[in-house]
Amino acid sequence: MSEKLKIMMVAAEAAPFAKEGGLGDVAGTLPRALSKRGHDVRVVIPRYYKIDRKELGLKPVGGPLGVSMGIMGFLWCAVLEGRLPGSDVPVYFIDHEQFYGRDALYHESGQRYLDSDNRFVFLSRAGCELCRMIDFSPDVIHVHDWHTSAIPVFLNTLYRNDPLLRDTASLLTIHNIQHQGIFYKGLMDVLGVGWEQFTMKALEFNDQTNLLKGGIYHATLINAVSPSYAKEIQTQPFGHGLDGVARDRAADLYGILNGVDYDEWNPETDPMIACSYSGDYPSGKALCKEELQRIFDMSVHPDVPLIGMVTRLTNQKGIDVLAQAIHRIMDLDIQFILLGAGDAWAHFYFGDLPNRYPGRFGCHIGYDNTLAHAIIAGSDFFLVPSRYEPCGLTQMYALRYGTLPIVRSTGGLNDTVDNFNETTCEGTGFVFHDMTTGALYDTIAWAIHTYHNKTVMETLIPRAMSRRFTWEDASVKYEALYERAVSKRRGRH
């Protein structure tokens, strides 16, 4: 590390305060790792209704914060300060009842909030204005997905001559390019950056305002949450209409794999599993499998391979292909356990399979963290047949627990699971490429065949358990990107 950096991270969510996905993990965990490396990191998120100011001991910062919202005029909010647990990293909560005083983060009853545009333009502008309130001149503002993609636009327009922010670089992390923040073109008058930014090389997208597109064009640097995904978003269909934009910024686009919280996901210390175990002392895994079979009222057979799956039940996750292949898969001598929620049809389809395959198929519709730990610890294989997967964490958890992943070669799955080589016995899982029922079935059958070779399994499992994807490693890579972004912003290269 060449110098201590001042970093502001602005995001729609951050664990443990508010989280719906990997974005929350990154914004809640990466700042702690950066702080340990000596950087001055501040986090900014909304104060959603679920975030209890009294329970967390949040303290007011200064007086009301005025935020310009273009033709909407100035809106005012409070700012509350807390800390990321286990650290001294300040978290500033933007407290605006009209925008954030709701039970959910983004949507209710499957429908996006109608004022999602204003909610996150407000967050983005408030993040910039907060710098004035706390007298903080960041070297870099790290923004995430479309929700805060207006910040790079603001830095290059409204704040380009601001003494506090004119030298501030921006890094935009793309967690999922499918979600872009596309709204009516009149949002330009709320942004207040001038209609000259409503162009193909900025915010305009099919005569609408696309916040992520504007952020990609204006950010100093961009990264995706895995090296493979950084390449994939430059192609169709993975770019979801922005592949050309990603190619335009290819020289400034990087891939950094997310890390895993090994304090939570560790079979040696996990309180949610039936028995602890390790690569050196693996016998406890058999007891976890036995307990998992009992939980799902399955036949207790130690030598029958058990495939686990914890996922959202959506087509992105390959659920439709699995549905087409599942009966053929169940013709194999296996057991299968599925935990997840998502599309209604999948709830009915997979929810009925325990009746068709009693003692062999287990299903829980919904999400239960304790069950997720039990499935990942007690299964022999872990299935992730995603169409695309920007990073993915469950396959990394599975590796740590010696549960060999069966995955499609895409995004972070491609970067974390090494395909088994029967000649050399190298690898940590089983990988297929084509998104077809045949490829899915054949790869599962291959894994099951391998399962019965105990010598091979005794080599693969400890190797899988030894793999690590840490936030410490990721923070070093982000640090290098910050330094590169600062140099670029200040014209040093």
Image (tube, rainbow, N blue to C red):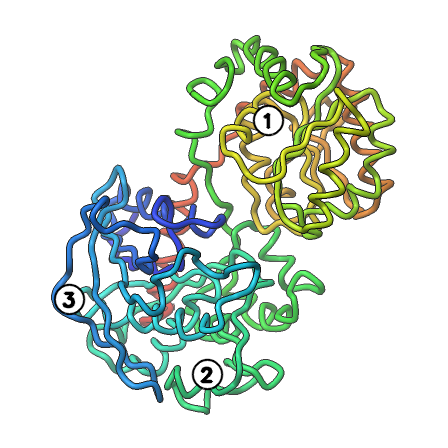
The residues tagged by marks 2 and 3 sit, at their Cα atoms, a distance apart of: 29 Å
Q: Residue furthest bottom?
A: 195
Q: Nearer the viewer, residue 407 or 45?
A: 45
Answer left or right for 423 relative to 37.
right
Q: Residue at x 23, y 47 (%)?
A: 83
Disc nearest the viewer among 2 and 3:
2
For residue 176, what is the image quadrant?
bottom right
Q: Position of residue 84 (x, y in %)?
A: 27, 45
Kind of residue at badge 2: Leu
Q: Secondary structure at mark 1?
A: helix
Q: Nearer the viewer, residue 370 or 89?
A: 370
Above or below: residue 344 compared with residue 100: above
Q: Which mark is residue 259?
A: none
| Pointers 2 and 3 in contact (C-beta within 8 Å) | no
Residue situated in front as seen by the camera: 406 or 246? 406
Earlier in the chain: of badge 3 and badge 1, it is 3
> Spatial distance from mark 1 to mark 2, Cα to Cα?
45 Å
Residue 419 in view, yes or no: yes
Q: Which mark is residue 135?
A: 3
Q: Which residue is mark 2?
A: 187
The mark closer to the camera, 3 or 1, is 1
| Residue drawn 59% across the image and 45% down it | 412
What SS does tag 2 mark? helix
Q: Is residue 405 above or below residue 378?
A: below
Q: How many marks?
A: 3
Q: Which residue is mark 1?
A: 375
Towards the viewer: 383 or 167: 383
Type of amino acid under label 3: Asp
